[in-house]
Amino acid sequence: MKYAVSIYKNQDIQHLKDIADSFVLYIPKMSCVYDPEFNIDSALEELKGKEIILGINKVYLEWELDALREFVLRYSGYKFLVSDLGAVQILKEAGLLANVIYDPNTLICNSMELELFSRYGFSALGMSSEIPLADVQSAYRRTEAKIFYQVFGRKIMFYSKRKLVDIYKEFSGLEFGSEGMELQEFMRTEKYPIFYNEGGTYVYRDYLISLLKEMKNLSFLEYAYIEGITLNPEIIAKIALIFKKSAEIEDISELENELLALDLNIKDGFAYKDTAYVKEGFDGKN
């Protein structure tokens, strides 16, 4: 198992480069969420000798594909984190499918889907974090596929290509910056981080998931991914160390206490429960 961490800012690298096994660099204008000031070539130089995964996981429009082709050929010696099947086709044409970690977010939910996409020859596949862990374990036992799976951090809960923040500004007459935005419903206390760029609007869940106590049962993962968006790099470094230590010892109670001491809003998410759709007006008795 390799522990992979997200990198959004160049200054984060110094805190993480000696801790993680792999690094997912989110590339400006090619990732869903990114820092426009991120310098990819500087980051690659600083992480020389480490395993690099270039995050190009946005949904691409037709007019963006030429730039994508140029990018993947320029950085063909690295791995790529991809969510869009159009981007997969570009990488296939370039003969680079073996460099691809294909993570379509919520698409791969069972062993049949995992087996189907394994035939492409990807480096690894991302399974949905919105299914119970038991289903992930079952899918692996049936396929022995290489799995990229998020074990800590926030998950995107909503995405739209629409420029919703600009629409809201126009409707409300308010003016504000795009840094540190949060969405809060009038009658609720939860705050949902919002990121906004030319690719659209991205809303993340108000909590972080943590699978620390399950890492022994997830030892089959090819990549255990730690997502650090909204957290400072010092905290991410502590979390990565906690997770790596959990693989080395039997009793992780002290590590659980270390994680608890960071005072983060951590919940189980969908790890132990299935999603259920209840039709409006249906009481479930019939």
Image (tube, helix red, strand yellow):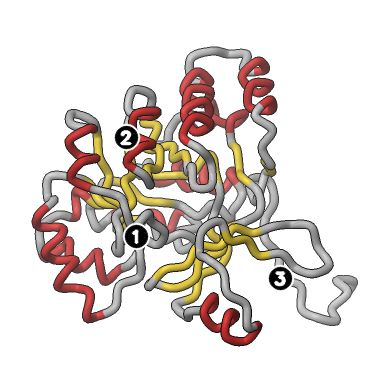
Give residue 3's position: percent from left, percent from top: 40, 32
- Asked which secondary structure carries label 2, the reply is strand
Left or right of 132, for residue 235 = left
Judging by the rendered image, the residue that carries numbered circle 2 is 22
Residue at which label 3 appears: 277
Look at the image and tell me whether residue 117 can be seen.
no
Q: Which mark is residue 31?
A: 1
The percent coordinates of residue 13 (x first, y second) are: 34, 34
Type of amino acid at the residue the image marks with label 3: Tyr
- Mark 3 lies on a secondary structure that is loop
Name the residue located 18 percent from the left edge and 31 percent from the top edge.
Answer: 48
In the picture shown, does residue 160 fall above or below 244? below
Q: Can you tell which mark lies on residue 252?
A: none
Name the residue: 16% across, 69% down: 67
In three-dimensional space, the C-alpha distance between marks 3 and 2, rounded to whole angstroms, equals 37 Å
10 Å crowding of disc 3: few (<14), some (14-19), many (20+)? few
Residue 250 appears at what percent x and percent y? 58, 13
Residue 66 location, quadrant: bottom left
Q: Earlier in the sequence, mark 1 or mark 3?
A: 1
Disc 1 from disc 3: Cα separation: 31 Å
Quarter the C terminus occupies:
bottom right
The amino acid pointed to by label 1 is Ser
Q: Earlier in the sequence, mark 2 or mark 1?
A: 2
Closest to the camera, between mark 3 and mark 2, is 2
Kindly state the secondary structure of the residue where label 1 is placed: loop
